[in-house]
């Protein structure tokens, strides 16, 4: 032993390639994708008219099929054109308010209203007597039952559950939300992850998903970083709201470098992006005074007396740049500077490619994404255009195994769960036991996307339990059968009618995207 | 559990071997388990998020500690419940961990206050990767060192993780057993149904990675569920009849009985109990992994009460649970975290990312009731970069001592497991001779 082992990641990838070739070719009516690893993005030609390409677009740019979506992608002249149309539609949708169901509308209250709700809960709890304690029990069948007005005592908890419900509803109902916009929202929420169960974060997770991840999903990256930096969910989650200049503090308070570090390490440059501990500290000093506000529309304020007005140097940039300039603009400048760095472009290119293309994306794709990022000042929509035009996106050897959340969304979508709360509970529970609880990934790195993490024996059995359960007694959907490989089709048809859709969900075609 | 008394379940060869394997061990003669002869077992409890070690092992004898931490220090031992519990003139135990004090006094619990990774990263994610691959400084993908070690132990699965879906430390080419957190571990799942399992495996025939995972997962869950259920039933049978009569047969009665009347284990302690049960019943399992999150206390970490105290209490209960299961001569339980936290409290009554930290070792082979290695105090000049505990002892050296001293692993193998680490002779007294 102890010769360096071939790591499971590589092994899985290698097996995946083989399978995909088999799987994709088995049901592709036209010629399969022809691109070869090694072809460059600029010169490759590739076929995107095949059914396999259409199926891929449906699963990578959304969360599986609905009758309408299936019809739309099948009737498009070509999957790549359909993909671009989806991108434009997603961008347009991101500029509009979300179509929240009435029962979930509260997550989109104004920030002062959300602060107020949290305050009312505090007051209500302060008034609780030991003789009649609060009943904290929330049976699962009531988790997503929002038919009654939100109780003051349970405002925070209800906001958490409504936010999760929105994530489940919006990823599984394409009449509610553009599927690619739901995907981009997932991606950015995760990149700028917050843990919604941290006490003060609770009321804000839904608002954060809508106004940070969704609203900026296909805009400029620097606007997205800034929006997350100033949102109460992030200010609370990474403790920035309490970080102040020690000189200014009356009560022993001072610097907290948590947010500054993750801003460098995770949100922008990446851990090997060339910063030092001194940069972390200096950036934390630059950001002193950035805190929450229960009164302003943005939920944010800059408190100048808490700001460290001394000279700071972050990655060679001096703050304040001039003696006259100080305060809030320093932080904004620093964030925009970080968001435009080549190391940031590299990191975002890699993350997007890992989410949309392959666990180990080809270097030429990464270079192309990075170049477009830098050339456009971090215009995410334009970076996505490059991605959709790349042969790597369409190449059948680039396989991706769905994460639990993706699988939960696919399952809800495929069984047409709509507003069926019991199915939401099942999907929520599955994501949690599979290790990817929604809005409850504790650490700021967000969850990984790769098959080495998610394709493990125990995890697969939990996935199958969920698939077979959620689809039990669901009506058969035979329009899907032509999309399945002969082996899958035969396994499905050997089941009784009530089990067939469950087997479809458990099939390789639905496990991968 | 033998193939003979389970005629209803057609077993494939793999199953048969698995169950025979378990059975064969159960039939071992008693002398095989006599003290000294059984190979040791190693359990790692990994605290994700960088736990604040000097709140657990409180350096109350160092005046600097109180200067650095005006609002979050644990008070000097005064015999009361809201001060440190004296271990010696320098260190004390956090009062939320009072349950562990008897273990220290019995000499089976020890601490290494200056341990950690030689790499200077303050990134949780990089540091955890280093700890789990055993390769400080390398971000490259690699197998987890417990996975590599389990391969050394032989072909049978010898490593068990409870809780996480696929922790890096157990990831790699060698098959390991992973079990759900909490009560979910007792459920065998849809694939326990033979017809369903066979239909799914047939559907995956052209897809080896899915097929192998489904098969391995089904095997593991059926075995796990059977063992845990059996353990609960056995405990219920052994319980005083009064307890059984009051609510006979109910789940909660079985649970209560399984815990000998103590309240049922929850959270980390329940996972510890499941880990102990499974490793007790399947003696091929020699490596255990548990993890707990929530240690990244940047804000209001509290002192004798608060978020950190609650976590330490839960850790302490889990360790007591593990002690019940892992008290054979060569068993060792280790508690560690990816790095420590700043010695000074930060501006928000918490602590930021640091470097060195306190590791804990528990077991009969451990030279317990004392701390080991170098401690250079909290004077500013002695801190790493003026702020953190220094790393005097490479975590790999700590594990190497345990592996070589109790687990029957050759010294050369520890060098292959942890390329580039150096044997640390200052830790030679870590284990009982």
Image (tube, coloured by chain):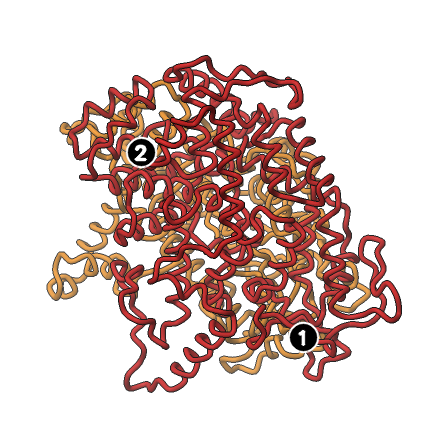
Chain colours: A red, B orange
For the N terminus of chain B, the quadrant is: top left
Badge 2: residue crowd in 10 Å (few <14, some 14–19, many ≥20): many
Residue labelled with disc 1: B69
Q: Is residue B167 above or below residue B150?
A: below
Would residue B354 appear left or right of A434 to someone viewing this image?
Answer: right
Q: Is residue B223 above or below residue B88?
A: above
Q: Farthest residue toward the right?
A: A323
Q: Is residue A51 above or below residue A150?
A: above
Badge 1: residue crowd in 10 Å (few <14, some 14–19, many ≥20): some
Q: CA distance from mark 2 to mark 1?
A: 55 Å
What residue is shown at x 44% (from left), y 38% (from top)?
A62
Would residue A103 appear left or right of B119 to someone viewing this image?
Answer: left
State the count of labels. Answer: 2
- Residue sitting nearer the eye, A102 or A315: A102
| Residue B314 at x, y percent in the picture | 44, 63
Is label 2 on the same chain as label 1? no
**SS at mark 2?**
helix
What residue is shown at x 67% (from left), y 42% (from top)?
B136
- Residue sitting nearer the eye, A319 or B339: A319
| Residue B376 at x, y percent in the picture | 74, 62
| Residue B62 at x, y percent in the picture | 70, 73
Which disc number belongs to residue A505?
A: 2
């Amino acid at each position: 032993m102890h010769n360096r082992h071939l790591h499971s990641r590589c092994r899985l990838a290698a097996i995946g390639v083989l399978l995909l070739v088999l799987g994709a070719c088995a049901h592709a009516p036209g010629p399969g994708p022809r691109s070869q690893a090694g072809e460059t993005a600029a010169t490759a030609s590739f076929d995107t008219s095949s059914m396999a390409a259409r199926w891929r677009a449906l699963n990578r740019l959304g969360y599986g099929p609905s009758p309408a979506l299936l019809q739309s992608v099948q009737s498009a002249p070509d999957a790549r054109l359909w993909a671009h149309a989806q991108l434009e539609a997603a961008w347009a949708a991101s500029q509009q308010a979300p179509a929240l169901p009435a029962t979930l509308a509260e997550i989109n209250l104004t920030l002062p209203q959300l602060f107020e709700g949290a305050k009312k809960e505090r007051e209500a709890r302060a008034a609780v007597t030991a003789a009649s304690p609060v009943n904290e029990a929330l049976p699962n069948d009531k988790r997503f039952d929002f038919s009654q007005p939100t109780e003051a005592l349970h405002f925070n908890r209800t906001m958490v559950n409504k936010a999760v419900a929105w994530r489940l509803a919006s990823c599984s109902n394409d009449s509610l939300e553009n599927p690619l916009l739901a995907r981009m929202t997932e991606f950015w929420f995760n990149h700028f992850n917050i843990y919604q169960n941290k006490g003060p974060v609770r009321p804000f997770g839904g608002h954060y998903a809508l106004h940070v991840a969704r609203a900026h999903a296909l805009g400029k990256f620097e606007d997205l970083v800034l929006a997350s930096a100033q949102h109460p969910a992030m200010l609370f989650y990474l403790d920035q709201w309490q970080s102040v200049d020690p000189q200014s503090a009356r009560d022993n308070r001072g610097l907290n470098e948590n947010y500054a570090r993750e801003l460098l390490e995770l949100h922008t440059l990446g851990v090997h992006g060339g910063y030092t501990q001194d940069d972390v500290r200096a950036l934390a000093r630059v950001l002193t005074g950035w805190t929450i506000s229960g009164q302003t529309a943005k939920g944010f304020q800059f408190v100048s007396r808490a700001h460290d007005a001394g000279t700071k140097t972050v990655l060679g940039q001096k703050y304040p740049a001039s003696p006259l300039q100080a305060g809030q603009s320093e932080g904004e400048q620093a964030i925009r500077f970080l968001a435009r760095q080549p190391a940031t472009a590299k990191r975002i290119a890699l993350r997007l490619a890992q989410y949309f293309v392959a666990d180990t994306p080809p270097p030429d794709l990464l270079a192309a994404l990075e170049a477009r990022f830098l050339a456009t000042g971090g215009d995410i929509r334009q970076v996505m255009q490059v991605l959709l035009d790349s042969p790597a996106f369409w190449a059948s050897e680039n396989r991706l195994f769905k994460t639990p959340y993706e699988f939960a969304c696919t399952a809800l979508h495929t069984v047409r769960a709509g507003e069926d709360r019991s199915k939401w509970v099942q999907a929520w529970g599955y994501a949690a036991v599979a290790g990817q609880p929604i809005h409850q990934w504790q650490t700021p790195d967000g969850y990984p996307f790769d098959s080495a993490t998610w394709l493990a024996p125990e995890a697969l059995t939990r996935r199958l339990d969920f698939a077979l359960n959620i689809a039990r007694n669901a009506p058969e959907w035979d329009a899907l059968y032509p999309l399945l490989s002969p082996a899958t089709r035969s396994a499905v048809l050997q089941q009784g009618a009530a089990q067939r859709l469950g087997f479809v969900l458990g099939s390789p075609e639905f496990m991968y995207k | 559990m033998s193939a003979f008394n389970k005629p209803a379940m057609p077993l494939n060869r793999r199953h048969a071997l698995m169950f025979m394997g378990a059975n064969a061990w159960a039939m071992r003669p008693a002398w095989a388990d006599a003290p000294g002869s059984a190979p040791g077992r190693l359990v790692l409890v990994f605290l994700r998020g960088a736990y604040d070690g000097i709140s657990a092992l409180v350096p109350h004898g160092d005046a600097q500690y109180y200067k650095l931490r005006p609002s979050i220090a644990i008070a000097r031992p005064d015999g009361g419940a809201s001060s440190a519990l004296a271990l010696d003139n320098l260190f004390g135990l956090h009062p939320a961990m009072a349950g562990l004090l008897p273990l220290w006094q019995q000499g089976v619990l020890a601490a290494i206050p200056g341990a950690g990774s030689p790499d200077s990263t303050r990134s949780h994610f990089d540091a955890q990767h280093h700890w789990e691959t055993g390769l400080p400084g390398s971000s490259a993908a690699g197998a987890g060192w417990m996975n590599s070690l389990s391969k050394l132990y032989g072909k049978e699965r010898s490593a068990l993780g409870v809780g996480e879906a696929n922790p890096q430390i157990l990831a790699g080419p060698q098959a390991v057993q992973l079990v759900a957190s909490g009560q979910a571990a007792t459920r065998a799942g849809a694939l326990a149904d033979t017809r369903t399992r066979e239909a799914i495996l047939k559907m995956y025939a052209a897809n080896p990675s899915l097929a192998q995972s489904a098969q391995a997962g089904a095997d593991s869950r059926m075995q796990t569920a059977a063992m845990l259920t059996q353990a609960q039933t056995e405990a219920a049978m052994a319980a005083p009849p009064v307890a059984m009569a009051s609510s006979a047969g109910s789940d909660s009665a079985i649970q209560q009985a399984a815990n000998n009347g103590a309240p049922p284990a929850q959270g980390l302690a329940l996972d510890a109990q499941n880990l102990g049960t499974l490793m007790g019943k399947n003696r091929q399992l020699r490596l255990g992994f548990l993890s707990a999150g929530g240690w990244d206390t940047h804000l209001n970490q509290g002192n004798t009460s608060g978020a950190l105290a609650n976590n330490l209490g839960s850790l302490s209960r889990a360790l007591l649970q593990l002690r019940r299961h892992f008290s054979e001569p060569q068993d060792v339980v280790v508690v560690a975290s990816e790095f420590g936290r700043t010695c000074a409290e930060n501006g928000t009554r918490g602590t930021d990312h640091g470097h060195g930290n306190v590791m804990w070792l528990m077991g009969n082979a451990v030279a317990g009731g004392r701390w080991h290695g170098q401690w250079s105090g909290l004077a500013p000049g002695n801190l790493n970069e003026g702020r953190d505990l220094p790393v005097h002892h490479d975590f790999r050296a700590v594990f190497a001592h345990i592996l070589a001293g109790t687990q029957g692993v050759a010294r050369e193998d520890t060098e292959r497991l942890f390329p580039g680490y150096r044997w640390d002779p200052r830790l030679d007294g870590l284990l009982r001779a």
